[in-house]
Amino acid sequence: MTEPIDGLQGWPPPVLDPAGPFAGPVNTLSWALFGIVIAVFVVVMIALGIALFGPRSWRRRIGGEKVLWGLGLAFPVVVLSALLVWGLGLTAQLSEDPDPSEMRVRVTGEMWWWRVAYLDAQGNEAFQDANEVHIPVGQPVVFELEAADVIHSFWVPRLGGKMDMIPGRRNILRLQADEPGSYGGQCAEYCGGPHALMGLIVVAHTPEDFAAWRAKQAAPSTGLVAASALPVAAGRQVFQASGCGACHAINGTDANGQAGPDLSHVGSRRTLGAGILPNNQGTLAGWISDSQAIKPGNRMPAYPVLTGQQLRDVSAYLESLE
Amino acid sequence: MIGCADKREQPRELTGADAANGLAVIERVGCAACHRIPGVAWPTGTVGGSLDGFGNQSMIAGRFPNQPQTLAVWVRDAPSMAPATGMPAMPITPAEARDVAAYLYTLDDD
């Protein structure tokens, strides 16, 4: 696949540029509705013009009972009924029940990020990630959408329609990407303070690349093996001593907190802070030191207690977790 | 006395550096996660201090004379100059570092 040069490529997402079979019909329907709305608007404006400024004979004509029954009743009934039938037919496949063999991902909306869990064939969580969903191209992927706190809405415009995430419910949405690439997404239901800073990226791989990615992601990061080298080892120490593991999990270590995003492979993510910053050691250090200045109200406190050296070490450690 | 003469305006120019590209690099790697930088609307980080008026500042990080070649090294690999700094090495090329420095010298209070 083509690696994006910029971690934020694909975000913010373009809305009328479908890239898969679940977005195409929505796009077609939108344009058809725009077209019909414009046509009706033009007809109404012409009728209004005639009514105000037309010659008496024309005015009499558009005031007749025939016009009332024709344009006022029959025309909308025919057009709206036809549109309903066509629209339902066009979008019927969007709500088809998923096939049990299709890959499943559970995405949970949290204030203000996305918890992503990849499910195995039995429907159990295989491993977690955050703010980024990886999928294979050319096949539908089932998204089980949940919410942990308030209502969020999962929206990846180039791949499909919006679906609300409602506490206590599991909504199903299927998406498919036809080409490898990055597709931006955004929370589409106001969910409090930093709602506008709650983005995500869907990354579509060829099936072979996806299998390799999945195998790598399910295992502890290979970065942990190299963790004896400075400054990574020192950073791991800082991570433990500062209690980061109370909220964040890192596969292969003692850190097993579940309140915040899983950091097992944080170094390989394209963005930080839920789709809002490029991911490198600098932005990571800035986020750790004072994420409140970047994303005010987010649940991670600022850490103004780390020395410069500690900050660099811990960010080096996290960046090494690829 | 020469020492009391008016301080001469230091020429802060980097031959061939492109300040506009410097701003693009700053946005791409997210310098604003830590620094408030005029020209970048968001974010406005508070970790490393504001760079407003940086062109008039006489020192870099309170340690080094604010000279173009020094700054071009600092923005790319600060820890090599100050091992205790919180500013990590940044993923930019030496040419990009010169562009970034050129942009920072356009930030003038007056």
Image (spheres, coloured by chain):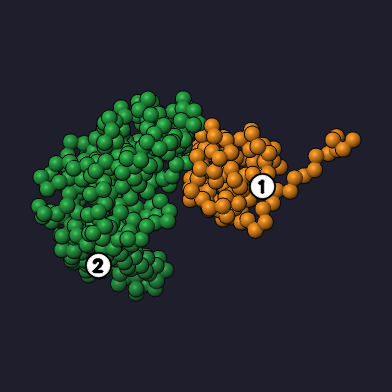
Q: Residue at x 43, y 47 (%)?
A: A278
To which residue does mark 1 refer? B68
Which mark is in front, 1 or 2? 1
Image chain in green: A
Query: Circle 1 marks a residue in which chain?
Result: B
**B59 sits left or right of A79 in the view:** right
Task: Check disc 1 and give the amino acid type.
Answer: Pro
Quadrant (top left, top right, bottom left, bottom right) of the C terminus of chain B:
top right
What label does residue A213 carry, if any?
Answer: none
Q: Distance between the residues labelled 1 and 2?
A: 74 Å
- The quarter of the displayed image where residue B48 is located: top right
| Rendered colour, chain B | orange
Is residue A179 visible in the rendered image? The answer is yes
A310 versus A78 height, above or below: above
Q: Out of A192 and B40, give the one closest to the viewer.
A: B40
Q: Where is residue A288 in the image (x, y as percent from the top left)?
A: 42, 34
Q: What is the chain letter for disc 2?
A: A
Return the x and y of residue B44 as percentages of the image width and height. Answer: 51, 39
Q: Is mark 2 on a helix, strand or loop?
A: helix
- The residue lying at 57 percent from left, 47 percent from top is B39
Q: Quadrant of the N terminus of chain B?
A: top right
The circle drawn on residue A71 is 2
For residue A147, above or below residue A176: above
Mark 1 burial class by Cα count in 10 Å: few <14, some 14-19, many 20+: many
User: Residue at position x 20%, y 45% from top?
Assistant: A118
Residues behind callouts 1 and 2 on a single chain:
no
